[in-house]
Image (cartoon, helix red, strand yellow):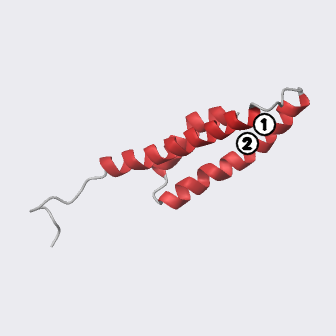
Amino acid sequence: MELILAVLAAGPLGYFVRDRRRALLAYLAAWAVAFPVQCVVVNSEGDLDASYWPINAAILAVGLGLNRLGMVLRERRRPGITPGTAPL
């Protein structure tokens, strides 16, 4: 669940939310909802072992990176003011 959220939502949130802080907070809020639900489901199946925590930390780091990548791509695609085209 967390991996799907990181792959499908982190980048678009970084791209479409204009403020960097709000984009990051939006992703972290979605992660804060998905992660406890995922922990409960995994624990109920008896699969919660020591490797679960570092793997989920890595998935969170990838999601944060994708969120940042979305922000960078938005900044690159935004039209800049070139000399001679500035409004008067």
Question: Height in image: 22 above or below 38?
Answer: below
Q: Identify which residue is drawn at 64% across, 51% down.
A: 28
**What is the C-alpha distance between the residues marked 2 and 1?**
6 Å
Q: Secondary structure at mark 2?
A: helix
In the picture, the quarter occupied by the C terminus is bottom left
Q: Which mark is residue 34?
A: 2
Q: Identify which residue is drawn at 90% across, 31% down.
A: 44
> Which is more toward the observer, 57 or 67?
57
Q: Amino acid at mark 2?
A: Ala
Quickly name the residue at label 1: 38
In the picture, the quarter occupied by the N terminus is top right
Q: Amino acid at mark 1?
A: Gln
Q: Identify which residue is drawn at 81% across, 38% down.
A: 39
Q: Position of residue 17 (x, y in %)?
A: 49, 54
Q: Identify which residue is drawn at 39% across, 48% down.
A: 72
Q: Answer with the quarter of the image where residue 48 lies.
A: top right
Q: Position of residue 32 (x, y in %)?
A: 72, 49
Q: Answer with the quarter of the image where residue 36 lies.
A: top right
